[in-house]
Amino acid sequence: MEITVDQSKLAKALAIVSKVATSSRTTLPILSNVLIKVLNGKVTLTTTNLDMAVVDYLPTSSSKNGEITVPARLLADFVANLPKGEVKISVKETKITTTSGKYKSTMNGTSASDFPELPELNEKEAVIYKIPVDDFKDGMSSVKIAASNDTTRPSFTGVFFNTDSENLYIAATDGYRLAERKLISGISSEVKAIVPASTITEVLSSISDDVEEVEILFDESQVCFRMGEIEITSRYIDGSFPDYRKLIPNSETTAESIELILKRDEILRVTKLAALFAKEVGGSIVLETSASKSALLVSSVANEYGENVSEIETSVDKDMKVVLNSRYLLDAINALSSDEMKLSMFGGLMPVKIEDAKDTNYVHIVMPLKG
Amino acid sequence: MFDVWKNVLEELKKTISSEKFNTFFQKTSLISIDDGEIKIGVPNIFMQANIKKSFDKNIREALEHNNIEVKTTEYVIAEANKVKKKSREVVSIEDIKPHKSRTYISNSPAKSIETGLSKDYTFENFVVGTNNDLAVYSAKTVIDDPGGKRNPFFLYGKSGVGKTHLIQAIGNELLKKNPNLKILYTPISHFYSDFIAAIRSKNPDSWKTKYENLDVLIIDDFQLISGKDKSQVEFFNLFNDMYLSKRQVIVASDRLPEEIKDVDVRLAGRLTQNGAFDIQLPGYEEKCAILQAKAEYEGKEIEQKAIEYIAENVKTNIRDLNAEYEKLIALSELRGMTPLEIINSGFSKPSVSSTRRNTTAKKIIDKTAKYYEMSTDTMLSKSRVAHIKNARQVAMYLLQNELHLSTTRTASELGMKDHTTVMNGVKRINTEMKLNFKLREDINILREKIYE
């Protein structure tokens, strides 16, 4: 087996695939290896941690079929430090030789037959969506923040893909807050699947600048993200996701509600200020509207250090008070991108809803703390 | 029996390297061993592929060494429930429940394009109570004899009481009995827009292809035909055509045809010639039963007390009842608390729209008298004139059913001494309502009015 490929392209590909190979599950040594494979002219690099697999199609071809695995990190670091130009990889038995001009290394590989079998995606049956890359990136990163790390409730550690009659949505929650985004409209298929948030993180960091759209394929037992020459396949999280849409309050079904249009940097600043004092009390801050002052008051009390209150002028006709965790509110505000945002309150025991002032595709709700 | 898996794992440990064992067998389980057809639970598809490929032989041997006959092995994805055990021992089998993967994909939407029926509406998940038993009974006669003596089948009742559910359940059941039937479920508005679209197109008769040759036609929201004269004529023709050739027509509406503005008298008469069946708002017991059935159907756990709380607080219709239940379940799954804990914590308040219903005894009495066009005094007099007595009994019925007053209390609200008069009056209304459309309609209208 012999491959010749551009150094920068190989380095980039190895950087992406080696992230999965060096992840924490090291029980089986071969999982930290990358599988280099030539099959029918196509050259692929593959790594897996048995939760997901990353495959990179190298922009080159090779005539002789063959496969070998080598420690991914070592090869990635070696190639990254080579000068620009062509890199030649040749394999003899289990020895792999990498050459670039005067630089040359020989590594001990392991036979590919020990490398885990990767399940094949059932492309015929799969439900497929194509999503413009910017929508994909914005959507995933703004929703993923609400997912949990707590593995005792597995379905909360993932991003929930779901559909109604025409839209594809993604949602995530940790039980205290919830984010949802409409990804695309005009679909004619159904999906209900929880994809690990860690997979989404990997996918996001593997999208290169020249990718224009991300293709997502769901089959019965795995999901595949295709972006350019990279393909990430992942297991699902087996579990059920709450029927969350019932939890998003709206002014029509709730007795009392207040909608505030706020400047995003202003509410961001006062929340940060209040958060400083809130550390002592587990991050809890108070949002209070005052009709007489025409203002939103954001305050916090730290018994030891003192207290803080900030006022944002805004038109409001009702008094309402809700206690929130400042960290969750900050995350929600940071997930928005435009200058103006809408904050809706529905009473002290109801979630607070945070949206862009104009864009209605993204909703974030934060559950209240008991004041 | 499942201790067997522990032994199998112990044996596997000896035959394969500890690295491989730790990588692949940590979250496995033995699900069933039916006569040698072995099912083994594995955590995900990656594991599935590899365990099957690399260790099937080892597993078979280990099972056989434990005196288990092995004909076939199947590896299914079933994540072992996480257990907080510190030791590296494999999860004890009692903690493992294989459960169906909740992942779902489909290249077609849930609603069938051909029939318009949604598979979620069945008789199995339709709760029968005194508010709808007659309608359900008649619906079943349609299934036994489509196009027969219950043709047409006309169903009416307020919005959100389950009309759509019942008529679609008829459709689904008919289809189950005879998959070759050509059935179409459609709201009248779609019929109307198909018709309009055809008129605008070059081929004015093109809409007919969809409606021709149907064995069963199910029309929903029939009241919306009001004012659509042209499509009414077309519908009448279609109806006649189907009726004469003994093909079943099922119609649901929120009121009787004669009460819909601008509906042709002949059509109205034809639609209800075999009777009209109504669904009433469910009472407290029915509401509890509906929620109970829903929870069972979905496999959700909810305390009886929580069900009672929802049933007490949602006073409008089944749609709101379901919405409230779903909200509570979602919140409980989200917070990791039981539904009752959520209610007690105050995090769940029924939506205003479903509870904004308050009325008083005085209001009920006044509105009833006004509705029957007599003074309150006349109604409450001891007159035995039929229509006055009827009004008085309706008031009794409403006081009991809407305010849940006791018979004695009802009697005193009406200025009467003898509570048995109330008992007899309410009993008469209950019986009469089953037979008398007019009375039923009166009471339905009053039910709205007393909350205005």
Image: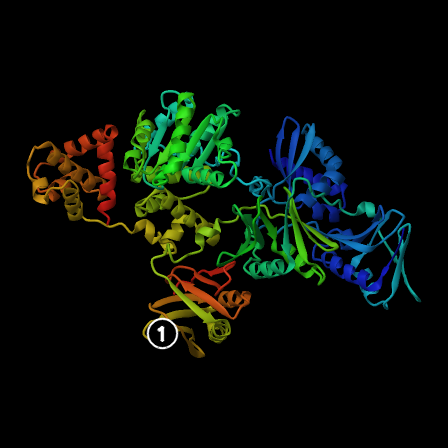
Q: How many marks?
A: 1
State the image coordinates of residue A312 (x, y, percent, origin top left).
42, 75
Horizontal side, residue A21 vs residue A146: left or right: right
Compared with A295, B410 (above or below) is above
How is the model colour-coded? rainbow
State the image coordinates of residue A47 (x, y, percent, origin top left).
75, 53
Horizontal side, residue B202 vs residue B78: left or right: left
Compared with B22, A336 (above or below) is below
Rendered residue at 73%/33% (across/down): B61
Looking at the image, which residue sits at the far bottom? A306
Compared with B148, B425 (above or below) is below
Residue in front for this viewpoint, B10 or B34:
B34
Whether residue B180 is visible, yes or no, is yes
For the C terminus of chain A, give its image quadrant.
Answer: bottom left
Horizontal side, residue A30 vs residue A103: left or right: left
State the image coordinates of residue B429 (x, y, percent, origin top left).
19, 32
Identify the amino acid type marked 1: Ser
Horizontal side, residue A177 vs residue B367: left or right: right
Helix, strand or loop for disc 1: loop
Whether residue B124 is visible, yes or no, is no
Rendered residue at 29%/31% (across/down): B265
Toward which corner of the image does residue B154 lie, by quadrant? top left
Name the residue that disc number 1 marks: A294
